[in-house]
Amino acid sequence: MKKYLSKSQIEELKQDFKENLKGFVQTLKSNVSTKSNEWTIKGFIDVFKNIYTISADTKIISKILEIHIFPKLLDFAKENSFKLVLPDHQNYYPDISLIHSQNDNIKFAIDLKTTYRLPDNPDFCNGFTLGSHGEYFINRSSKKNIQFPYNEYLGHFCLGIIYTRNAPENIDETKVYSIDKLKSISSVIKDFEFFVCEKWEIASDKSGSGNTANIGSINKIEDIINGNGTFKKLGEKIFDDYWMNYRKISIINDKGIEKKITKLVEFLNYRGIKSENINKKAKRGRKI
């Protein structure tokens, strides 16, 4: 695919797309928030006009947020001459593929990521995963668990939403409200912050979900917003190389014991690359 575009063309297209997407997400807060910065979604409504409050479960919140901003994503695609393609299967990467309406070689991957600020340390969030480092990441022409082969995308982006969870005592999940009480219902989340980054920019060097093959993110909010992940100064090629080989390269540690490489500093030493550019202040998060 990339034979049709030079490296400079690809980079220019990617940067233009990134700037457009960043501009777009700055418009989303007003579409999901009240003037007091609470979520405009208050609950579920039935045909009898009864409103049931939303659970604080992060998976439920994440899905509803995606549905909430989806019409705006469709507008963004149309305004920028892209076709929006959803994955054929639920567990496929990415959440959204954007394909230019006049050139199928121009594709961008967008993963929607939502997470919450830690209540005891609001400068940090719970973190999230950045996709698999398994088959489709290693074999860039693979079609396993991915909508289009990884190497067909010119860029891989995260469109993220960070929010604060309302205090549990303010939410009564057992209560049913009438439609005339809509404005009195407390929102389960508030204080939204949107961001756009290429996923390698906010990656850590640690797995994001235990035994499964997922890349973990950093979790310091300021670093996420500014794309200051562990690989920021090293670049995307080192990010790719590291995660393609995560737990695959064996080394002998200081005690003479064979072990698999699971740390960036070990990997850089193995490759003979100076490790001074690692962003050691970047903190790893957990999957939500």
Image: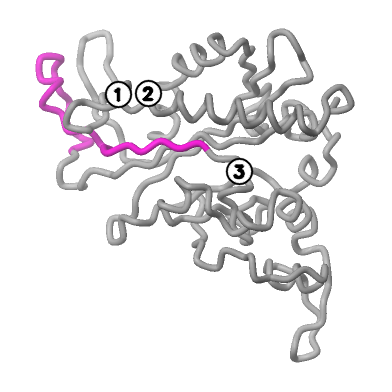
Task: Tell me which residue sits at (10%, 26%) in the image.
Answer: 184
Give the magenta part as a residue range: 172-196
Of helix, strand and loop, which one carries label 1? Answer: helix
Of helix, strand and loop, which one carries label 2? Answer: loop
For the residues labelled 1 and 3, the Cα–Cα distance comes to: 25 Å
Asked if the residue under mark 3 is in contact with the one under mark 1, i.e. CB atoms within 8 Å, the reply is no
Kind of residue at badge 2: Thr
- Residue 18, placed above or below residue 131: above
Q: Which mark is residue 30?
A: 1
Mark 3 sits on what residue? 199
Mark 2 sits on what residue? 27
> Residue 154 location, x and y as percent?
73, 30
The colour style of the image is one colour
Of helix, strand and loop, which one carries label 3? Answer: helix
Task: Tell me which residue sits at (22%, 33%) in the image.
Answer: 37
Sequence-first tag of 2 and 3? 2
